């Protein structure tokens, strides 16, 4: 696949405060296997043969620090741009979307704190969406193996059928016009969702799912780093990246 065939941009959200992580520097710049966590995330996303552009959304005032952290990342032929984060995740994604050219057909949104993302997940999502004209987006995740409880005020009020529930992760990939429409509508109405697919669904879009690797964890607290390092080492032993 040549560079002219690349028609996907990935917005990597790395602008959170990381309060739960408990480090002044934040989880994105925490060291993982000898280099900043975020550099792993960016490098893996740029390995996808569909990706033409990576937009890394970083905290305002720390752009130089983040640029330096990514100096060693192998980005192949993918152009990397930076956007400034906002108060909420939605604001940060909107900022990143503003850096994506209109001619880009697909936009993936990925958490910067998921360094075990694979290029295969991005490519699989892209193929899944391209083959299904009725869908506006696709979420990478996995079926829930745990029993779910509906809880209100500390009391269980229901046990839903877990066979109908999936654990949503990122990347989440969309047709660019559908994602832009969902975000503009959210800005106009004040709508808030916990992920990008939620906004697309609320705007009338149809979103599918595909199963991705269960080790695509999100580093949230400091103890997650040790798990991510172990998973990364296991992948290396298996010959996966």
Image: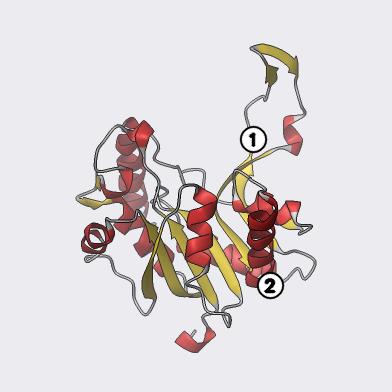
From the viewer's perspective, is 155 left or right of 213? Answer: right
Q: Which residue sits at x=71%, y=14%?
A: 156
**Residue 58 in the image: x percent, y percent?**
36, 57
Look at the image and tell me whether residue 241 can be seen. no
Look at the image and tell me whether residue 185 can be seen. yes
- Find numbered disc 1 in the image and state the secondary structure of the residue it sits on: loop
Q: Is residue 31 above or below residue 144?
A: below
- Find numbered disc 2 in the image and state the secondary structure of the residue it sits on: helix
From the viewer's perspective, is 201 left or right of 174? Answer: right
Tell me the number on the disc at residue 85.
none
Q: Which residue sits at x=74%, y=51%?
A: 202
Q: Earlier in the sequence, mark 1 or mark 2?
A: 2
Q: Which residue sits at x=25%, y=64%?
A: 67
**Residue 225 in the image: x percent, y percent?**
31, 38
Q: How many marks?
A: 2
Rendered-image quadrant of the C terminus = bottom left
Q: Residues within 10 Å of mark 2 (few under 14, many from 20)?
A: some
Q: Which residue sits at x=55%, y=67%?
A: 123
**Residue 135 in the image: x percent, y percent?**
75, 64
Q: How is the image coloured?
A: secondary structure
Q: Residue furthest top?
A: 155
Q: Residues within 10 Å of mark 1 (few under 14, many from 20)?
A: some
The answer to which of 240 and 225 lies nearer the viewer is 225
Residue for badge 1 = 144
Do callouts 1 and 2 mark residues in contact (Cβ within 8 Å)?
no
**Mark 1 → mark 2, Cα distance in angstroms:** 26 Å
Residue for badge 2 = 130
**Residue 235 in the image: x percent, y percent?**
37, 50
């Amino acid at each position: 696949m040549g560079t002219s065939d690349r028609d996907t941009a990935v917005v990597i959200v790395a602008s959170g405060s990381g309060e739960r992580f408990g480090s002044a520097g934040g989880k994105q710049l925490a060291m993982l296997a000898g280099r900043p966590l975020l550099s792993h995330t960016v490098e893996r996303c740029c390995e996808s043969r569909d990706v033409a552009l990576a937009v890394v959304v970083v905290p305002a005032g720390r752009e130089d620090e983040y640029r330096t952290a990514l100096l060693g990342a192998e980005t192949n032929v993918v152009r990397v741009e930076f956007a400034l984060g906002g108060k909420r995740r939605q604001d940060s994604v909107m900022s990143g979307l503003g850096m994506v050219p209109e001619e880009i057909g697909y936009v993936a949104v990925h958490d910067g704190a998921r360094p075990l993302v694979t290029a295969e997940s991005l490519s699989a999502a892209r193929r899944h969406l391209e083959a299904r004209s009725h869908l506006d987006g696709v979420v990478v995740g996995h079926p829930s193996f745990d029993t779910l409880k509906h809880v209100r005020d500390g009391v269980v009020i229901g046990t839903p059928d877990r066979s109908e529930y999936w654990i949503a992760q990122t990347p989440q990939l969309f047709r660019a016009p559908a994602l832009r429409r969902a975000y503009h509508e959210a800005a106009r109405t004040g709508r808030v969702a916990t992920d990008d697919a939620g906004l697309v669904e609320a705007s009338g879009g149809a979103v599918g799912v595909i199963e991705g690797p269960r080790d695509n964890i999100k580093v949230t607290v400091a103890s997650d780093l040790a798990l991510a390092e172990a998973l990364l080492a296991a992948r290396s032993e298996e010959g996966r990246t």
